[in-house]
Structure formats: structure tokens, C-alpha cells
Image (cartoon, grey):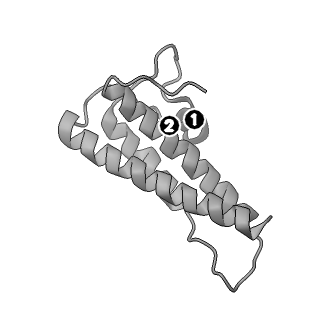
Amino acid sequence: MSKYIATRAIRGANALVAEAEAMLQKALAEKGGETPVAFPNTAYYLPVTYGMLNHKVEKLADLTFSLEHAKKLLHPVPDEKLWVPYLGEALDCGMATLLAAETIEGIRFVYGLSLIHI
């Protein structure tokens, strides 16, 4: 795997997890941990978190578990002078990115913001 691509992926994952963590702390302070979280038109809670971690997210406080798991998957940005295979680290960070992005979308739902449509 290209060190350049892995570095960008790892850096991006760390940034997105940090953003999700800040948003979650703000939402918990403003709305409380018991505030319901759900995506419209799904019967599977938050689908990535449920599918990958078998964790049901029903309220804001439930997002703490998935975000803590995402933080455990993060890796530091590769050293400039040392080359090692980065595939495992990049894949871990990719999963952390998915969990963080779903956390952000769940929080957006709590605030009544529309979900991102791709």
C-alpha cells in the first residue's frame, strides 16, 4: 500500500473520530444521554454499528460505545523515515471512519438536521 495514501487515510480517520467525539460531548451536554437516536426508515438501529459491533444504538449515550471502539482502531500517522506495510492500519482506520461518520449522522438526526444523501 502506498505510504502516501495510508498516511492520508490515517490522518483523515483521526480527524473524523475527533470531530465525532466533540459533537457527541456537545450533544450529550445539550440534549442528555437518554435522547433517542435513530435513522429514518431503518429497523436496524444504526446499521454500521449494529452490523459490525452488534451494538444497538437507541439513545445518545449508546454512541459512546461505538466511538470508544473507533478510537481503539486508530493508528498514529506513519513516520516520515520508516516504511512498513500500512494495509492493516489503513483498514482499521477505515472502520473507525465508518463508525465516526455514522455517529455524526446520528447526532445530526438528534438536532433535526437532514441526513447526508450521496
Report the amino acid beneath label 2: Glu
Residue receiving disc 2: 102
- In this rendering, position of residue 118 left or right of residue 60: right
Front-lying residue, 75 or 117: 117
The numbered mark, 1 or 2, whose residue comes first in the sequence reads: 1
Relative image position of residue 14 (x, y in whole percent): 51, 59
Q: Residue furthest top?
A: 41
Q: Which residue lies furthest to the right in this view?
A: 1
Residue receiving disc 1: 48
Residue at position x 19%, y 38% from top?
30
Residue at position x 59%, y 71% from top?
77
Real-space Cα separation, disc 1 to disc 2, in angstroms: 7 Å
Q: Do the residues labelled 1 and 2 touch (CB within 8 Å)?
A: yes
Front-lying residue, 117 or 17: 117
Q: In which quarter of the image is residue 92?
A: bottom right
Q: Which mark is residue 118?
A: none
- In this rendering, position of residue 89 left or right of residue 37: right
Q: In which quarter of the image is the C terminus?
A: top right
Relative image position of residue 18 (x, y in whole percent): 42, 56
Relative image position of residue 22 (x, y in whole percent): 33, 51
Q: Is residue 73 visible in this depiction of the protein?
A: no
Query: From the viewer's perspective, is the residue at label 1 or at label 2 nearer?
Result: 2
Relative image position of residue 31 (x, y in whole percent): 21, 33
Describe the element under mark 1 as helix, strand or loop. helix
Q: Is residue 2 visible in this depiction of the protein?
A: yes
Describe the element under mark 2 as helix, strand or loop. helix
Residue at position x 69%, y 55% from top?
91
Task: Answer few, some or many: residues within 10 Å of disc 1's Cα (few below 14, many 20 plus, some between 14 and 19).
Answer: some
27 w.r.t. 59: above or below: below
Residue at position x 48%, y 57% from top?
15
Report the amino acid beneath label 1: Val
